[in-house]
């Protein structure tokens, strides 16, 4: 198996690290569909990790004035860390933009922040490569790797490198903030489309503002997807040098790599 590892690493296409793969396939109305894919599994894993990070900390975080140093010690280190990050986001990032409305929207904004952060950080954990290595144990009767094991892939990766995931997050944000603005004040929402410009500029400002409503979430989806995909590709290309290095130097190559 060790002898076959360099050739397997060299044969892996870096793009394979960022392409979603089906885990359970089927047919719907005569068309092939992916019932479960690698990204969908990672979304569930990341959601569970986010809940394990935030919910226990939220239960330990006290509210109201008059807290003492003993209250902070009782909450524990992790709860204090979560609280510090959340308070910073509220007071320094979202508060200046939303003003008195900040507390109203913070639960949604905090949820998106922690979920996206966990998705991005989980992309740094080589779960796909570790689970793929488990498949290297599938040897045929002669003790060699079978043909379908030439480039094994596992379960893992960065969920936010999928345009479907970032697009879904962008759609959630689009309907959330536009819906909240419209139902709060339909007249104020329409007035916002004028951009505060004089009435004779409305013919230009209104189409521009409407286009901006759709361009902003589209740009956010593309940017997050491109950043996660580009970073993963760069790391995959660098790690692809490990195979040729081991092939050239044999056992010393492991130390050099």
Image (cartoon, rainbow, N blue to C red):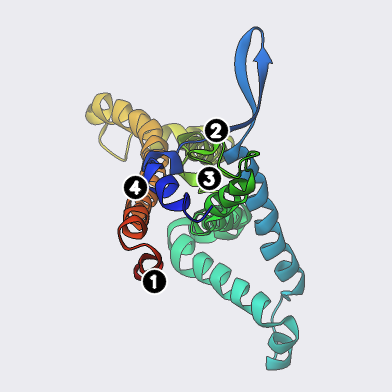
N-term-proximal mark, 3 vs 2 = 2
Please state the horizontal and vertical placement of residue 74, each as a whole percent of the image.
75, 86
Cβ–Cβ under 8 Å for marks 2 and 4: no
Disc number at residue 230? 4
- Disc sitting over residue 148 in the figure: 2
How far apart are labels 4 and 1 at the CA level? 27 Å
Label 4 environment density (alpha carbons within 10 Å; few <14, some 14–19, many ≥20): some
Residue 180 position in % (x across, y down): 57, 40
- Give the distance between the C-alpha atoms of the residues marked 3 and 4, in whole angstroms: 14 Å
Numbered disc 4: secondary structure: helix
Query: On the picture, is 158 further left or further right than 71?
Result: left
Q: Residues within 10 Å of mark 1 (few under 14, many from 20)?
A: few
Callout 3–callout 4 Cβ contact below 8 Å: no
Q: Is 65 drawn above or below residue 31 in the view shown?
A: below
**Residue 7 locus on image (x, y percent):** 40, 47
* Residue visible at 57% across and 40% down in the picture: 39
Residue located at (50% from left, 56% from top): 2
Residue for badge 3:
159
Residue 184 or residue 67, whichever sits in front: 67
Pointer 3 with pointer 2, Cβ within 8 A: no
State whether residue 244 appears in this view: yes
According to the image, label 1 marks what residue?
255
The residue nearer to you, when weighing 105 against 41, is 41
State the separation of the CA atoms marked 2 and 4. 28 Å
Can residue 18 be seen in this snapshot? Answer: no
Front position in the image: 166 or 26: 26
């Amino acid at each position: 198996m060790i002898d076959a590892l360099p050739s397997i690493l060299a044969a892996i296409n870096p793009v394979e690290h960022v392409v979603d793969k089906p885990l359970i396939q089927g047919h719907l109305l005569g068309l092939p569909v992916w019932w479960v894919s690698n990204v969908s599994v990672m979304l569930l894993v990341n959601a569970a990790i986010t809940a394990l990070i935030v919910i226990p900390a939220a239960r330990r975080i006290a509210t109201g004035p008059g807290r003492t140093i003993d209250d902070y010690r009782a909450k524990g280190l992790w709860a204090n860390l979560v609280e510090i990050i959340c308070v910073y986001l509220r007071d320094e990032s979202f508060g200046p933009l939303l003003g008195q409305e900040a507390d109203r929207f913070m639960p949604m904004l905090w949820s998106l922040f922690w979920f996206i952060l966990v998705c991005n950080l989980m992309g740094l954990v080589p779960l796909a490569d570790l689970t793929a290595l488990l498949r290297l144990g599938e040897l045929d009767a002669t003790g060699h790797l079978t043909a379908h094991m030439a480039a094994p892939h596992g379960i893992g990766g960065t969920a936010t490198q999928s345009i479907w995931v970032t697009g879904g997050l962008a759609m959630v944000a689009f309907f959330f903030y536009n819906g909240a603005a419209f139902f709060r004040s339909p007249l104020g929402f329409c007035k916002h489309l004028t951009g505060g410009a004089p009435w004779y500029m409305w013919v230009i400002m209104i189409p521009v503002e409407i286009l901006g409503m759709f361009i902003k979430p589209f740009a956010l989806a593309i940017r997050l997807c491109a950043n996660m995909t580009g970073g993963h590709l760069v790391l995959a290309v660098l790690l692809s040098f490990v195979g040729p290095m081991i092939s050239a130097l044999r056992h010393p190559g492991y130390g050099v790599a």
